[in-house]
Amino acid sequence: MRDLQIEIWSDIACPWCYIGKRRFAAALAGFEHRDHVRVTWRSFELQPDAEPSSAHPGLTEAQMLSERKGLPLDQVQQMFAQVTSVAASVGLAYDFDRVVPANTFDAHRLVHVAADLGGADAAADVVERLMSAHFEHGAVVDDVDVLVGIAVEAGLDGDAVRAALASDAGAGAVRADEAEAAALGISGVPFFVADRKIGVSGAQPVEVFAQLLDQAWTTANPPLAIPTIAGAADAEACGPDGC
């Protein structure tokens, strides 16, 4: 039996990524072979040239998106209301009035640092806490103290994390993830890839993620099929119901 490798490209500042994360988790929880699924979080910056939050104090997420996309503010707020409603359906309490626009590069670095210090489970925990901090609690996810605090909450050593973030630790891994995304043709997130053979884009319904897991598992662990002699007629045999 071979483990199934799932890679998830996402951005901390992508509201659909958090929703997709919850839906995928629900599908995985109901998957028969969930103990043999290995999930790796990959970096993807939707706005790699975003200014740090310190460059625009007081700017709201709605104002930022309105200015960047050239959309009326009320239209952006309506979009946020719709996303908030969908998020609530999977147990998330989005609060766009508190969301602080930020550059997510260091947050992505933190995910890789967490993987190096604590393994895949620590990285997954940090991803969850980063997304919750950004969308539900209005935390500034490009502030070093905030990032270290999130890492400590995930059980990592704060001094080690602070030292890593003060260096260029994780930067190469973030860039490598983004280069792989480009090579795979991934232009939007969330994007889920199973064994580099099957992929699905977006915050799909739980049923679609369940189908992804089933199909990928069957591909990775095909059922044993014994070939029979061509042209041989059925002959007498016994089965569960008798002879």
Image: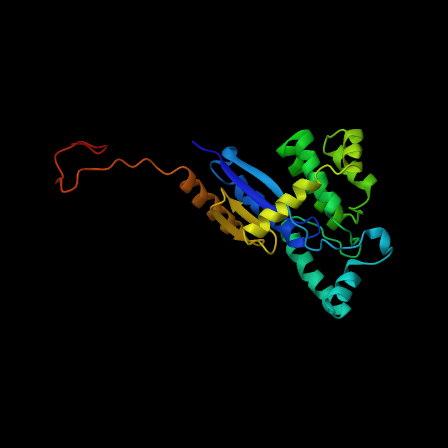
Q: Quadrant of residue 230?
A: top left
Q: Which residue is located at x 86 percent, y 56 percent? A: 58
Of the 4 image quadrants, the one containing the C terminus is top left
Of the 4 image quadrants, the one containing the N terminus is top left
Q: Which residue is located at x 66 percent, y 40 percent? A: 173
Residue 76 locus on image (x, y percent): 73, 65
Position of residue 144 in the picture relative to residue 31 (left or right): right
What kind of colouring is applied to the model shown? rainbow
Residue 2 locus on image (x, y percent): 45, 33
Residue 95 locus on image (x, y percent): 75, 54
Q: Which residue is located at x 75 percent, y 35 percent? A: 151
Question: Is 153 in front, or is 172?
Answer: 172
35, above or below 231, in the image: above
Residue 99 locus on image (x, y percent): 78, 53
Position of residue 83 in the picture relative to residue 184 (left or right): right
Q: Quadrant of residue 74?
A: bottom right
Position of residue 232 in the picture relative to residue 107 (left or right): left
Question: Is 55 in front, or is 210?
Answer: 55
